[in-house]
Amino acid sequence: MDSTLSPGVSPPDRLGMTTLPDRRRLGWSEWGPPDGTPVLLCPGAATSRWLGFGTGYLDELGVRLISVDRPGLGASDPAPGRDLNGWAGDVTALARDRGLGRPAAVGFSQGAPFALACAAAGVVSVLAVVSGTDELAEPSVRAQLVPDVRRLVDLCGMDPAAAVDSFTRVGPQAMAEMVTAVSGEADRVVYRHPAFDAAYRRALDEAFMQGSDGYATDTVLSMTRWPFDVSRIRVPVDLWYGTADTSPVHSPDRGAGLAARIPGARRHVVDGAGGALLWTRAGRILASLLERGQAPGRPTSSGRG
């Protein structure tokens, strides 16, 4: 495990709220220098703005890390009828309000489709997808899923209301147990780390402050067909996966198909890393993101990074 894990989950330096044009509020947090290069984090399932990553590297790299609660989670107001493209609109308004320009972005796990929506809309300038879920309802991806996940994907497509009802039965404790249950030892080492465990539990508790509807809606949006075409993404995208990632709801082929569908995408497969490589390889991911942002249009490559 990266020895910098503990500072990588330090409490936010700044907390705030942004009011959107429709009067909804988005809760956000920031770490790092206020004048640093903005990097927007789309966090994983059911986690709030409290949980950052790589914060021990931010001053050195000159990064201003911003995490935002999605609608209905944590401090952000619900948005009935929302979809992934609506999130790109929310980020556009947030970026304008916070002076972010077109920030770089990181999408972790279930946050990946939300970050990819921003990339497809041109709201962000460069993107790193880390242990990201693929478009699970896309036929070629669905065919690779384990039966239990395939059944959930089918339920989301056929009866979204029933799927939301099913997912609203999950709370912070059940979520933590579910994540641990599907994780391999490489990830359990991270989750058992005292600093990470405390930050993760707080992020879960805050994410569910308004109940489970926000998490349930996020899950259905991630498991149904996405309302944008990843082949039309024109910003640089890096995909990061670990060979020891055992999650059945991340990419079933560790991003190979997703990389093939996104023009110019660069895929990194890290030997021995689990799904938590957002924290165990944080410095490497951030440095690569900044480098990619300075050199857009690099040719596609695929390999072990």
Image (tube, rainbow, N blue to C red):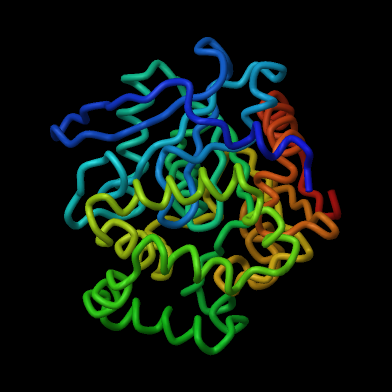
* Residue at x-position 64% and y-position 35%: 8
Q: Residue at x 29, y 77 (%)?
A: 166
Residue lying farthest top? 35
User: Residue 7 placed where, x, y %?
Assistant: 65, 31
Count of picture labels? 0
Front residue of 38/301: it is 38
Q: For this view, does 49 lie left or right of residue 199? A: left
Q: What percent of the width, then of the height, locates residue 156? A: 34, 77
Q: Is residue 243 left or right of residue 248?
A: right
Q: Residue furthest bottom?
A: 147
Residue in the picture at 68% in, 53% down: 190
Left or right position of 86 against 51 = left
Q: Position of residue 56 (x, y in %)?
A: 67, 27
Q: Quadrant of residue 171?
A: bottom left
**Is 106 drawn above or below residue 174 in the view shown?**
above
Foreground pick, 115 / 26: 26
68 to 19, vertically: above or below:
below
Specify the farthest residue to the left: 23
Q: Residue furthest front?
A: 194
Residue 33 drawn at (x, y percent): 56, 13
Image height check: is 72 above or below 62?
Answer: below
Give the vertical position of 15 relative to 280 (above or below): above
Identify the residue at image location x=62%, y=53%: 262
